[in-house]
Image (tube, rainbow, N blue to C red):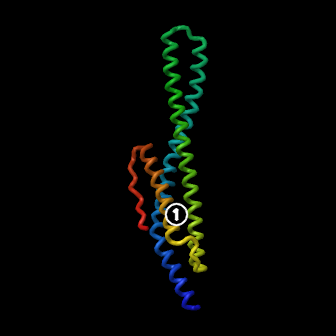
């Protein structure tokens, strides 16, 4: 019985040890995402202010269109209103994109906590909660999700993030 417990303890330690490099990659991805989203926070405030200003100006233009008689002025008001609507739409898309990023960051941190709890159970009880393959697949999926969001952020701001590498 003692030998069986020792083998189980060694197996649990080995599984946790094999998982640590992938966890490091995942944590690196979470940190990079948090940093990038922090940078977007300032841009988001600017975009919200721009959208608010554009909405106010659009209302003024609509009111002005009601009283304008000159066809050239009406055309210019229409062109300007179209540009303002485009700015508002772009700001709204940016806001939704940033919200999605913050939600994904929150999910990643929660999932990391779950995996950490699983690993603690493995170490404390010698139990194999989900198996090293399933745990590795879960971590790989989370890293791939972070990688996808970091690439999407690159497309938004034109930068290039180095790829996350998963050693598992």
**Which quadrant of the figure has residue 95?**
top right
Quadrant of the image containing the N terminus? bottom right
- Indicate the position of residue 130 as horizontal and vertical percent values: 56, 70
Horizontal relation, residue 72 to residue 109: left or right: left
Which quadrant holds the C terminus?
bottom left
At x 49% / y 67%, what residue is drawn? 136
Please state which of residues 36 and 131 is positioned toward the viewer in this rendering: 131
Question: Within 10 angstroms of label 1, few (less than 14), some, or many (20 or more) residues?
Answer: some
> Residue at (57%, 87%) from the top-left corner?
5
Judged from the image, the secondary structure of the residue bearing numbered disc 1 is helix
Residue that extends furthest to the top in the rendered view of this protein = 69
Q: Disc 1 marks which residue?
A: 138
- Residue 63, image x and y in percent? 61, 17
Q: Is residue 89 above or below residue 111?
A: above
Q: Nearer the viewer, residue 124 or 66?
A: 124
Quadrant assignment, res 118: bottom right
Q: Is residue 100 above or below residue 31?
A: above
């Amino acid at each position: 019985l003692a030998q069986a417990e020792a083998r189980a303890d060694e197996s649990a330690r080995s599984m946790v040890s094999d998982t640590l490099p992938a966890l490091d990659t995942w944590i690196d991805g979470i940190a990079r995402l948090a940093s990038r989203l922090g940078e977007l926070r300032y841009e988001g405030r600017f975009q919200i202010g721009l959208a608010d200003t554009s909405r106010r100006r659009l209302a003024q233009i609509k009111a002005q269109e009601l009283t304008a008689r000159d066809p050239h002025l009406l055309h210019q008001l229409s062109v300007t209103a179209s540009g303002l609507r485009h700015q508002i739409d772009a700001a709204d898309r940016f806001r939704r994109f940033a919200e999605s990023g913050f939600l994904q960051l929150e999910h990643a941190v929660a999932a990391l906590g779950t995996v950490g709890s699983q690993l603690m159970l493995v170490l404390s009880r010698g139990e194999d909660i989900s198996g090293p393959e399933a745990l590795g697949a879960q971590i790989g999926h989370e890293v791939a999700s972070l990688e996808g969001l970091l690439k999407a952020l690159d497309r938004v701001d034109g930068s290039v993030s180095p790829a996350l590498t998963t050693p598992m």
